[in-house]
Amino acid sequence: MTTLVLGGTGKTGRRVAQRLRGAGVPVRIGSRTAPQPFDWTDPATWQPVLSGVRSVYVSYQPDLAAPGAPQAIQAFTDLAAASGVTRLVLLSGRGEDEAAVCEQIARSAGVESTVLRCSWFNQNFSEDHLLEPVLAGEVALPVGDVPEPFVDADDIADVAVAALTEEGHDGQVYELTGPRLLTFAGAVAEIAAATGRDITFVQVPAADYAAQLPPELADLLMYLFTTVLDGRNAHLTDDVRLILGREPRDFADYAKQTAGTWIM
């Protein structure tokens, strides 16, 4: 039965799609560039991609903390259930009060559901807005010595595929973390060590950082950096190990394997 992967070209979605295809599961990519386009801002695109689908990996863009996310998740999950979908796996944000509202919506959709609460991805440094600063040799962010349990996108994808294809995950809320806590300064230092480059971390005032952001992302990123990064997520869980039977990927291993991305 076909699985719809929303955000199927993004950090976690493309990894989920690759793993499902490798396991012989029919996959439909949900993205604006797919043959059958899907756009969160255009509900008219939702029904066509749900036709014949039985399970969905739900990755909301840009983030479940963004304005309008609960309304979109409510409308989509209602439509998915009415269209014959029987299983949902929702990618959520760890420590985000707004995301918790979306989680409850998914869990009340009348289908099997699993929630994956995740902290900052390792891959934010190599596949997202932090790549350019790393390449430039200076990562300037409005965050201090707050430890984060950085989690790897490959671990998230492995857990998502388990929840999509195996029994026993219905109704579960999994909090996915890496194996250790690390500050942003520490993460940048790990990247510098892996690449042999001089890459520094600089803490900057929130107002200065916000002034450099694209207007459409400023409020969201400032919320994530100045509110969610207050230490609320500074603890680890065993969920990756319990679900996959192995330890989560360490940031140092990620940095070593990704080092070529940061060497120009």
Image: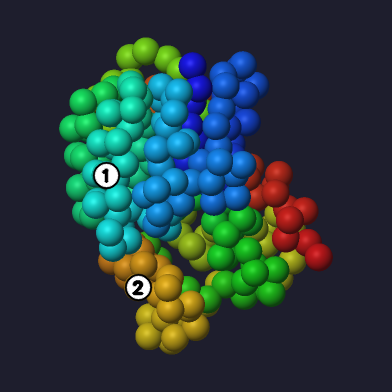
Q: Which amino acid does label 2 sit on?
A: Asp
Q: In this view, does 203 lie above or below 185?
A: below
Which color scheme does this rendered protein use?
rainbow
Examine the rendering and report whether any part of residue 181 can be seen: no
Name the residue beneath numbered marker 1: 75
At horizontal 30% and vertical 50% (from top left) the residue drawn is 72
Check disc 2: other Cα within 10 Å, few if <14, some if 14-19, many if 20+. some
Say left or right for 176 vs 201: left
- Counting from the top left corner in percent of width and height, residue 94 is at 32, 48
SS of the residue under disc 1 = helix
Could you tell me residue 244's position as x and y percent? 47, 22
**Residue sitting farthest toward the top:** 167
Residue 231, located in which quarter of the rendered image? bottom left
User: Left or right: where does residue 254 sit relative to residue 101?
Assistant: right
Q: Earlier in the sequence, mark 2 or mark 1?
A: 1
What is the secondary structure assignment of the residue under circle 2? helix
The residue that mark 2 highlights is: 219
Question: Which of label 2 and label 1 is nearer to you?
Answer: 1
CA separation in Å, label 2 and label 1: 24 Å
Residue 191 appears in the figure? yes
Q: Which amino acid does label 1 sit on?
A: Ala
